[in-house]
Structure formats: C-alpha cells, structure tokens
Image (tube, rainbow, N blue to C red):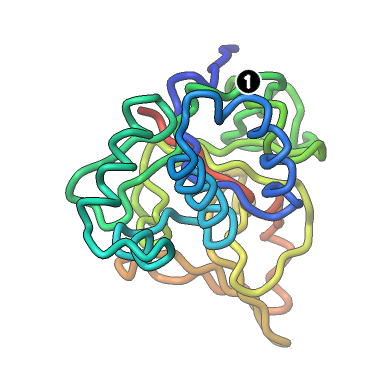
Amino acid sequence: MGYRNLAPFELVFFQRLGLRQRFAKFSNEVLMKSLSSRQEQVLRFLIDFNAEHGFPPTIRELCHHFGFKSLNTAHFHLRSLKKKGYIQIHPGKGRGITLSGKYLQPGRKIPIVGRIAAGKPLLALENIEEFLGIDKHFFGAGASFAVHVKGDSMIGAHIQEGDYVIIKIQDQAENGDIVAALIDDEVTLKYFYRTESEIKLKSANPAYTPLVFKKGDTLSLKILGVMIGLLRKK
C-alpha cells in the first residue's frame, strides 16, 4: 500500500466546512512574507474565488474585481505569484490558474478508495488503494477519503482524469451536489438529483447517459459522501 505526498499536486479548489476561514488563519503565518501588498490581495482573491465557486477566476474576472484597465496588469501579478511558487498558470485555458501545493504543510493522510469489497466497511483496509498526504489545514477534521478519477464523465465540472477528488463521508446529499456513489462495488462520481419518485446520477459530460434509480431500486445505490475538494497532479 503506497503513500502520495501533496507536494507534486496542485490544490485546484476547496469549499464548504468553513475552509476559507481556516485558510485565512494559515495564510497569515506562511504565505505573505515575499509578496507585495497587491500580490497578497490577488492571491487572497484567488483563494476566496476558488472556495466560493469551486473553480478559479478568469483573467477578465480578476481585472473586473481589482479595476485593472489592462489584461497585462493582471498577467504581471499572476506571473509574479507563479515565479514565487504560489500558483501555476496553464496557457490556453479560460480558467487556467491553480494554487500550488508547494507551500502547504502535509499533516494527515487521506485514504484513496477504489472498489468496495462486499460487506466491508468503507474504509476497511481491503478497500484502500493507498494514502494521499494532505495539508493539515484543509478539508476539515471530519472523516474523508479520496477518489482517483478515471475517464472523462465529469469533465464539464473541471474534473479530469488523474485528479484526486476529496470526499466528505456522509449518506445524504443536496440536489446539485457532486457525490461519490457506490454502484455494484464500484465508486463513481456524479451530480446528485432526487425527486419524490427517483434518484438521478448525472455526468458532467453529455456523452454519458444519466443513471436513474426508481424508488424501489435504491437498494443497489449507496451515497458514500459529497465532494469538498480537488487535487491535480502537476
């Protein structure tokens, strides 16, 4: 059973659980020593935008927030943050700014869960492929696990093959949540929707047909938890 440290990963987003407040306290301690006042403001905006929306801002959204009259001004500050190791920039992508894992402090291990052996608890040793090193300040203190993304069924939600999705363990979800669901011993990531008569699990890719479970068929479906974050390998 292996162990993966956070260092080679980028924190694409984190949300819920009061994470913005937790990160704000942490950032005062370690982030701002080498940053100008404006660079600090830009970095905090990137953090807050990710936390609120679940994805990074565009360059134009950054300009609008700060009143920059030129895209070059935004690019200048972003290049400075990249040079100092705080972010990564992916040219050609509309939302191609990701927070770097370079300055984070690994402090806990989150199990990566693949198949679920019949009759075994979710976090039984048989179900854990390996462990992911996660900064102790992120994703809260509650029980959670990671899913290694395979395929492109959630590409429309900015979830790519090879990503690690962080899941908070719970058996309830709200409409529109991205959930980890257990179907025939396999863990899948889908949007969750419930009506009085059925539960629908929908991909973020129109090439995939939604999975529909009528009221009497839900015994074959188990909600394992709700997505609270995403890590992407550099």
Coordinates of residue 147 in the picture (x, y in percent) = 56, 39
Quadrant position of the C terminus in the picture: top left
Element class at badge 1 = loop
Foreground of the two, 101 or 115? 101
Q: In this view, does 218 lie to the left or right of 113?
A: right
Coordinates of residue 96 in the picture (x, y in percent) = 30, 48
Q: How crowded is mark 1: few (under 14 residues within 10 Å), some or many (20 or more)?
A: some
Looking at the image, can residue 119 be seen?
Answer: no
Q: Which residue is drawn at 32% across and 33% down?
A: 80
Foreground of the two, 112 or 93? 93
Coordinates of residue 26 in the picture (x, y in percent) = 69, 32
Residue farthest to the left, as pictured: 92
Q: In this view, does 156 lie to the left or right of 182?
A: left
| Residue that numbered label 1 is attached to | 105
Coordinates of residue 8 in the picture (x, y in percent) = 43, 21
Foreground of the two, 59 or 195? 59
Amino acid carrying label 1: it is Gln
Q: Is residue 26 above or below residue 97?
A: above
Q: Residue at x 72, y 79 (%)?
A: 215
Foreground of the two, 44 or 87? 44
Q: Is residue 163 left or right of residue 197?
A: left
Res 90 → quadrant: top left
Q: Residue at x 53, y 62 (%)?
A: 53
